[in-house]
Image (tube, rainbow, N blue to C red):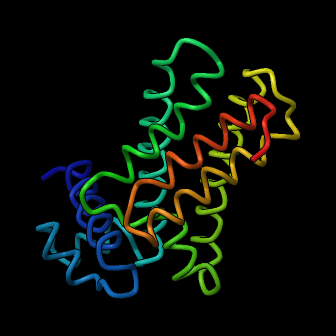
Amino acid sequence: MDLAQARAAALDAAEELFYERGIQAVGMDEIRAASGLSLKRLYGLFPSKSALVRACLEARDTRWRARLAAYVDNYPTPRDRLLAVYDWLHQWFSEPGFRGCAFVNAFGELGAVDPSVADVARRHKEAFGAYVTALVVAAGRPEESAAAYVLLAEGAIVTAAVSGTPDPAHRAGEAAARLLAGVSG
């Protein structure tokens, strides 16, 4: 197995285990076993568990944002693209094994003790916020209103994880549509 394959195997195994069971509950030996790598090779690729967590989150960020953008880009108008964010969230929440936002989960577990993990989580949230802000502006709404759309999405993510249902995405999308139309309630 070459370096790229070994790195991918480690990241895939770690990400799956971390997301399913939590970062602190998973030891490096479990990741070694799941990845098929020796412990020496695993530590050669990632000198610490923190480095592995950061790499998993960075890879997930790239994939997650690319999936979102690919979905949203299929919609014809700026308004439709903004509202498509909430439809995409519903699809994500409906996936088997959905356990909420990996970045919120990692921040909750390690944010107070590992500033580098907290930084990766913050960068992900900032990038998502900037993406939604660009959609809001393109839809003809003031940039200052973007925080409301971001909060609707973020609230839906947390609520879906806690409630175990994808419905918060639809409720957030309905609220976003009312906000776009300038309708209260």
**Left or right side of 36 for 169:** right
Q: Among all residues in the image, which is located at the extreme top?
A: 76
**Left or right side of 126 for 170:** left
Q: Give percent across and percent down for residue 176.
A: 67, 39
Q: Give percent across and percent down for residue 139.
A: 73, 22
Front residue of 146 and 124:
146
What residue do we see at 44% from left, 45% from top?
64
**Left or right side of 145 for 63:** left
Q: Relative to 44, say whether 92 is above or below.
A: above
Front residue of 91 and 107:
91
Q: Relative to 168, say whether 114 is above or below.
A: below
Number of labels in the image equals 0
What residue do we see at 46% from left, 60% from top?
57
What residue do we see at 55% from left, 56% from top?
156
Q: Relative to 143, say whether 64 is above or below.
A: below
Front residue of 43 and 157:
157
**Left or right side of 11 for 80:** right
Q: Relative to 19, say whether 185 is above or below.
A: above
Q: Give percent across and percent down for residue 26.
A: 30, 83
Classify residue 134 by image quadrant.
top right
Q: Among all residues in the image, which is located at the extreme front?
A: 185
What residue do we see at 61% from left, 87% from top?
113
